[in-house]
Each structure stands twice: as structure tokens, then as C-alpha cells.
Amino acid sequence: MAVLLVLALKACGGSGGSSSVSVIPAPTTVIPTSTPTVVLTPTPTVFPSPTATSVPQFAIDVRFPDNSLTPSQQAIVRSAALRWQEIIVGDQPDLRPTNIRADECAAGFPSTSLNFPIDDLLVEVRARDLGNERILGGAAPCFVRASNGLPFYSVVVFNSQNLSALEERGDLPITALHELGHALGFLPSVWDPKGLTVGLVGRDQPTPPGYDPHFIGPRAVAAFTTLGGNAPSVPLENQFGEGSRDSHWRESVLGRELMTTRLDRGVPNPLSILTVGAMADIGYAVNPAAADGFELGRSRPISEPLELQELELALPLRRFDATGRPVGDP
Ligand SMILES: [Ca+2]
Ligand SMILES: [Ca+2]
Ligand SMILES: [Zn+2]
């Protein structure tokens, strides 16, 4: 498909990535300097140590290596990442890659050598002229942990041709949430090595007649059943071509769910227990209680469909061991 790796064709202005800085107060050691002769016992004030009491959590480090997103657009993407951190709650092993250079995933990705520890997931976000106003963007993992196939480096690309309009219409928050879902691993490139799909014909194959791909992860299937679905597996998108097919819930069945391929304007597009279940199936610790309420089917006709035409980012997944070294090709 022509849009394949448009990403790679654009030169990057790779300025250094912004870094997120955590300020951790230094521990205070109180050394008594004298023995008090008057016994006044003040109630000791106990300052809990943040490192001792904090629960390890999943952290998405979103970076914008150039100025292609405005501050308000960046804030929207960061908010979407925080929403996902309510859903995905379990820490992943920190990882310090040893030899990932700039551009090793695609032109401009990563923006610099990844020679620093990554706690959970680093996502780099850029906007580029994708050459087709109907395409809103795309996202995909690039580098994954060999131990569990979960990404530690992913990319998100928005289309500079329509990003401002997307923001002005109020459609950017839901689009960013959707794209980060792909960045977290909601894609066949992560599902298939884990045996979570059946019936997919493969990326470059034409859509056969009666095409019927399904997701078979048990947590997603259980959620689907809870929602009233009556199949032993969850239907994946079987039409609309590359960028939509296979990598989303089936629009005709799941309607307004966030990870369908078309979003509805003016109404909620819930991040439901179905998608939360899929994230559990690929290996994340999740909090289903944080899911949005959702009902199967559509009681009313689609209001204003936002066709989320996406780039099919044909990024090769590369796997890295716990010491940060690449472990062959998947
Ligand atoms: Ca970690
Ligand atoms: Ca939809
Ligand atoms: Zn999508």
C-alpha cells in the first residue's frame, strides 16, 4: 500500500528528546546534637518516604522530539497517556538498551540513541505531512521485551495536514487515546506471536471473500461474553483495507468501542472491559474497574463518524533481553 512507511520518507529534525525529571526529596537524617535535660517529648512528625511507600506502577513516558505538536496538542496526548495508566497498572522490568541508535526504527524514530533506562514504555510522538488528508495518523510498537513481547519503545505519528482541525473539532483526545492503544500493543504484530488471533490472512494479502478474523485471548473473550457477545472469540475488523483490517474490533459488532476503526463524534467512544481484557491477554496487569461503561451494539445510528483512517506502520518489531541486548529477529 502506498502509505506504507510514509514515515520513513520524511527527514527528521531530530532535536534532543525532552526528558522527564522526577524530583525525589533526599532522605533526611536527623542526628541528635545534644542530650536534652528537659524531657519535652514533641510528637515526632513522620514524613513517609515516597520510594518506600509507592506502589510500582506502569509509566508511559511520552516525548515530543520536535515542535510538530503545539503545547496544547502535547497536553492532550499526555492526558491520554494518563488515562491508559489508570487501565494498565503493573510495572514492567526496567530496561536499558545497549545499542539502539537514532533512526533505527524509522527515520526520526528514535530521535536519539536510546542509551538510558526505560521504565515501562517510551513513546515518541511527531506530526508529519502524511500526504493524504484522510489519514489521521498511525502508531505502533517498535522495540519489545523478549521476555514477554511487550513494547518498551513505540511511535505515534499524526498528520500535520489535519492535526489542527482535529484539535479544533475536539476530536484529538479520543484519537490520541486510540493511537496510544496501538502504541501499547493493540496490533497483530504483538498479538500474533502470542497466538491471540485466528483467521488473519497477513498484512499484504487481499481481503478474501467471507473474511472473518478473530481475537481469542481469554480475558477479552470473557469481557465480550459479559457484554452479551455470543461468540467464542471476538470479531476483528474484516474490511476497510490495511490500517483498519485486523488491527481493530469489528465496527459492525463493537460500534462505539474505542478500538474500532471509526470513532463517533459527539458521543462517548468507551475504553471498555473488552479492550482492557485484550491488554491483559497480551500481558499487562490491568484494572478493569477503570474501564468505561459500554453496551454492545448501537441503539442509534452512528451520529457523525470520524473515519480514523490510519497509516499502516510496517515497523519491524525487534526484541531485547533484560540486559538491553537484541535477541535476534522475531
Ligand atoms: Ca519499570
Ligand atoms: Ca466505532
Ligand atoms: Zn486504529
Image (cartoon, rainbow, N blue to C red):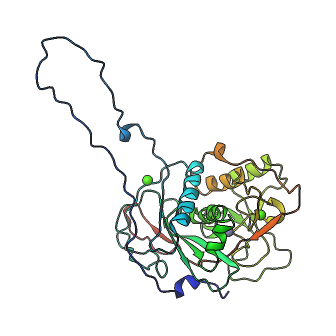
79 lies above or below 239: above
Residue 73 rendering spot, x and y as whole percentages: 56, 66
Taking 275 as reference, is 10 left or right? left
> Which residue is drawn at the image coordinates 37% and 52% (left, top)?
22
Image quadrant where one finds the N terminus? bottom right
Residue 293 rendering spot, x and y as whole percentages: 74, 47
Taking 76 as reference, is 170 left or right? right
249 lies above or below 313: above
State the image quarter where residue 29 is shown. Answer: top left
169 lies above or below 88: below
Residue 270 rendering spot, x and y as whole percentages: 72, 54
Of 37 and 83, nearer the camera is 37
State the image quarter where residue 217 is shown. Answer: bottom right
45 lies above or below 326: above
Q: How many marks overall? A: 0
State the image quarter where residue 252 is shown. Answer: bottom right
